Structures are given as C-alpha cells and as structure tokens.
C-alpha cells in the first residue's frame, strides 16, 4: 500500500489540526484529479468547539478556502467574502461529519439541516449548490477520515 493510501485510512478528530490538514489534502486531490479550473470560495466556522482543538483557546474553529483556477489556498481563519459560509455549533455538526451522504438519505439530511437552522445551530450564507462539481465527493471522503 502506498503512503497516500495508508494516510487515507487514518482517522482524526473532527476539526482538529490533523483533520484540517487531511481536508486540505482531499480538496487538493479532488481538484488535481479533475484538472479543475474552478473559481470558488468557502468558509466554515465551528462554534462551541472543544478548547483542546481551538488554536487560540477560544471555543471556535474557523477555516476558509479560496479556489482560483483550480488551485486551493487554505487558511485557518474566518472569512466573510466567500461564496458559501457556514457557521454552526460543533456538537450539532459532529454527527453530520460522520454521516455518509447519498440519494437514500437526502430527505433525512435536509430535515436535519432545516431543524438545525430553526434551532439556531447552523447558518448558511450563499448557495451550496454552486459548489464546483469536482468537490461533490468531498463530504463522503471527509467521513472516511473523521472520528
């Protein structure tokens, strides 16, 4: 097995430093494998995060990614000037980060997100359907390395 294959079998705690590195690696892999020319940006903010994971001792973890001509630039900071921004409670997101998505559970996912929005657990700004198609497998790939 290659080192890359072995690395993909490892699991990291959701939103940990290693998890964020694996996320970046997966985005880079998906963009490269499709010879992407995408231009898109996103930001995720996890509120109420465990302090052991928070880089500055605050219960918030943020990251953003700007994709320009198919190349991703990651930063572990919050950004407002993005195409899609999600701000959500860490505990609310944790089950979702482990939830493999597919056509069979789309209705359950939509209901979970709608209830989370009603409860103030998640806010999404922008249109997630405008995400580059080459990133469509990203969520399920993240599930594979999230514990």
Image (cartoon, helix red, strand yellow):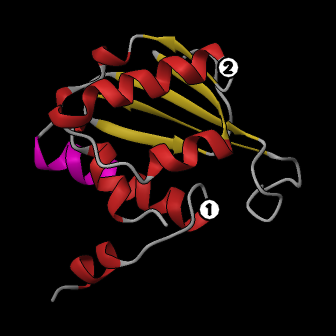
- For residue 117, which numbered disc appears in the image? none
Q: Which one is in front, 107 or 94?
A: 107
Mark 1 is surrounded, within 10 Å at the Cα level, by few (under 14), some (14 to 19) or many (20 or more) other residues, namely some
Choose mark 2 or mark 1, whichever is in front: 2
Relative horizontal placement of residue 84, taking residue 44 as reference (left or right): left
Residue 17: x and y in percent read 61, 63
Residue located at (11% from left, 40% from top): 35
Q: Quadrant of the N terminus?
A: bottom left
Q: What residue is disc 2 on? A: 119
Q: Which residues are magenta?
A: 26-34
Label located before the other in sequence (2 or 1):
1
* Residue at the left extreme, as displayed: 34
Quadrant of res 3? bottom left
Q: What residue is disc 1 on? A: 16
Q: In whole angstroms, how far apart are the C-alphas of marks 2 and 1?
A: 25 Å
Residue 106: within the magenta?
Answer: no
Residue located at (59% from left, 55% from top): 15
Check the image and report above or below for 142 versus 114.
below
Q: Is residue 111 visible?
A: yes
- State the predominant SS element of the stretch in magenta: helix
Residue 114: x and y in percent read 49, 17
Residue 33: within the magenta?
Answer: yes
Check the image and report above or below for 74 versus 84.
below
Q: Which one is in front, 2 or 48?
A: 48
Q: Is residue 62 visible?
A: no
Relative horizontal placement of residue 2, taking residue 144 as reference (left or right): left
């Amino acid at each position: 097995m290659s080192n890359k294959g072995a690395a993909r079998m490892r699991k990291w705690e959701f939103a940990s430093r290693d998890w964020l590195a694996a996320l970046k690696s997966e985005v880079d892999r998906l963009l490269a494998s499709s010879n992407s020319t995408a231009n898109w940006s996103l930001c995720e903010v996890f509120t109420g995060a465990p302090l052991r994971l928070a880089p500055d001792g605050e219960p918030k973890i943020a990251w953003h990614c700007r994709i320009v001509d198919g190349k991703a630039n990651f930063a572990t900071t919050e950004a407002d000037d993005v195409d899609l921004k999600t701000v959500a409670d860490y505990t609310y997101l944790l089950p979702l980060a482990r939830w493999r998505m597919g056509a069979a559970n789309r209705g359950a996912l939509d209901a979970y997100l709608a209830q989370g929005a009603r409860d103030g657990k998640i806010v999404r700004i922008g249109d997630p359907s405008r995400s580059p198609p080459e990133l469509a497998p990203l969520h399920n790939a993240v599930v594979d390395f999230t514990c």
